[in-house]
Image (spheres, rainbow, N blue to C red):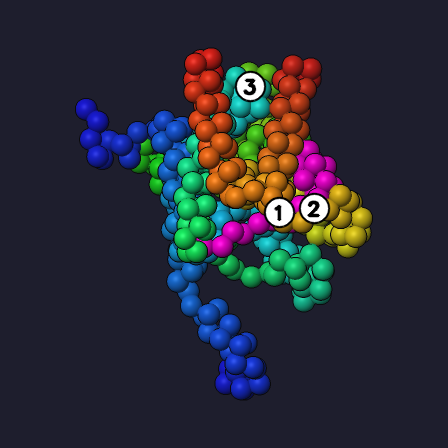
Amino acid sequence: METITSVFTDTHWSPYAVGIGIGILSWLSFLISGKPIATSTTFARIGGMIEEAVTGEKTKQRPYYKKIKLKMNWQMMLVVGVVLGSFLSAIISGDFQVGVWVPSLWASAFGDSAVLRVLVALAGGIILGFGSRFAGGCTSGHGISGTLQLAVSSWVSAIFFFVGGIITAHIIYLIIA
Amino acid sequence: METKKQVSKTTLNAKEALAEEDRRPLFFGLGFGILFGFMLHKGGATKYDVIVGQLLLTDFTVLKIMLSAVATGMIGVYFMKSMGWIQLSLKKGSVGKNVLGALIFGVGFAVLGYCPGTIAGAVGNGYLDAIVGGLSGIVLGTWIFAVMYPKLKGGILKKGDFGDITIPRLLKVNDWVVVVPAVALIVLLLFWIEKAGL
């Protein structure tokens, strides 16, 4: 029987319940923090902070890091929160993955080599990280928060995220595999 | 040391410094993140198979989540804007950024199988390809961009600049003239996706 607690221990919710929930979260984020939900600048800040730790103060002179400012902020806390929130949901629903290096869809086409998958994920991450800063946002900042504000930049970005993604995924799974 | 600094600052800067010491916004950020991550996991969006399934057009979970979030968000955000409670926070755009940059993002999206928000969720979900490969890749990719930024800034990023406009402002109409049909179209599209059994 569905009870209040079993809702939280369910592994899956309807995508519409989740979407409406994220929509309402965006209202609260605007109202309370005056900011839209976004994540990708945080990864750029982390990169800058790592470079700063290695090479020192001169990292801060990079024009891009002057622009985004290398310090802990609201968005970085949000990204930390996403890790914690997903962990919490996964643990209480018994879905936390232990020792999973290769997603099953990937394994069905390319085998279960962890090294291959990690190298491809690394390459994909580099392209994604570069592209997210090039486009000035990601699937959350442009794809959800920007499109819901009807920003032209975000609608154009969201469309081309999926154009690029759909074509590439088909090349990977239909041609390379 | 701290008092010397404050004395030398103007009143405005002192106010800003005070605001910076206020840790509450950071806690709100953490709280919003926890709720966002919790829901991303419940929706299945922290999983490679679901995200790549969307890009292969075999699993429409990601689109269903995004479109219902956008429709819901749009109504509330434009309502709060019309009441004067909030201001929009728009990103400036250009053809170079939002076409070329977004296409590059899309390639990475499909190769990695996570995006910056969902990879944080995948990390929390325990996926090791996300933790070891994807996370370090994304950080490295943003760093490459930061290094190249001075060269890109005045060139490709500025190509076809159109600023931070919204669709209603582009069409020179009242916000609701766009919000109402946009929400209606999204709802219709979602009904069609369901009817098609996707």
Q: Chain of mark 2?
A: B
Residue drawn where x is 52% and y is 46% of the image:
A38
Q: Chain of mark 3?
A: B
Question: Where residue B85 sits: x, y (%)?
Answer: 41, 56
- N-terminal-most mark, 3 or 1: 3
Label 3 sits on residue: B57
Residue B38, horizontal then vertical, whole percent: 38, 39
The amino acid at mark 3 is Leu
* Label 2: which secondary element: strand
- Specify whether disc 2 shares its chain with disc 3: yes
Residue at the image point whose x is 68% and y is 33% from the top: B103
| Residue positioned 69% across, 56% down in the render | A64
| Dot 1 amino acid type | Ile
Tag 2 residue: B162
What segment is highlighted magenta in the picture?
B86-106
Residue under label 1, please give it. B165
Residue reaching furthest front? B173
Residue A66 falls in image quadrant: bottom right
| Tags 3 and 1 touching, CB below 8 Å | no
Nearest to the observer: residue B38 or residue A94 = B38
**Where is residue A59, by image quadrant?**
bottom right
Cα separation between marks 3 and 1: 31 Å
Badge 1 element: loop
Helix, strand or loop at label 3? It is loop
Looking at the picture, how far across and down is residue A143, in whole percent? Answer: 55, 38
Report the front residue among B41 and B96: B96
Does residue B152 appear to the left or right of A76 in the view shown?
right
Residue A55 sits above or below residue A172 on the image: below
Q: Position of residue A95 (x, y in %)?
A: 37, 30
Check if mark 1's residue and mark 2's residue have beta carbons within 8 Å: yes
Q: Inspect the image, locate mark 2, and give the three-letter code of the amino acid beneath it.
A: Phe
